[in-house]
Image: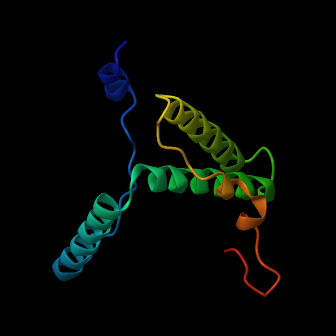
Amino acid sequence: MNNMDAVAIFPIRYRKEDPGTAESRLEEFDARREQIEEIYNHMPPEMQLDLILMFINTAEMRLRLTPPGTHVARWLDIMSRALRQFLMVMTHLQPGAPKPSIALEDPSLYWPNDDGVTLN
């Protein structure tokens, strides 16, 4: 099975969003385009990998707060493991491959501060 076969077998499932008014759809489109342009123009590979690492650590933190055995816990566990494997592959592609920042592995970054800020 090649990669295209896997895509045909397991298509991405997307959430449906409220279509809203024509004006709100245009505003939303413009905002998304601006977001994509910002990422495209100003996010080098290292920052992209940093973002993926932040997703991983956020999922792992939420997993610790989620009741075990729930579908959410399983989803968070699988997602964090899959993304860690992805980062491992991406950082070993070649000797000079982009790498995420080790500073983002600090667990204290992902827990609430003592100054009253809480996680939703």
Residue 3 in picture, x, y percent from top left: 35, 22
Is 56 on the left-hand or right-hand side of 47?
Answer: right
| Residue at horizontal 34 percent and vertical 62 percent from the top | 39
Is 48 on the left-hand or right-hand side of 111?
Answer: left
Quadrant of the image containing the N terminus: top left
| Depth order, front residue of 21/7 | 7
| Residue at horizontal 36 percent and vertical 35 percent from the top | 11
Residue 14 in picture, x, y percent from top left: 38, 50
Going by the picture, which residue comes out furthest to the front? Answer: 96
Figure check: 20 above or below 60: below
| Residue at horizontal 47 percent and vertical 56 percent from the top | 47
| Residue at horizontal 64 percent and vertical 39 percent from the top | 78
Q: How many marks?
A: 0
Figure check: 69 above or below 57: above
| Depth order, front residue of 47/62 | 47
Going by the picture, which residue comes out furthest to the bottom? Answer: 116
The colour style of the image is rainbow
Quadrant of the image containing the C terminus: bottom right
Residue 115 in picture, x, y percent from top left: 79, 87
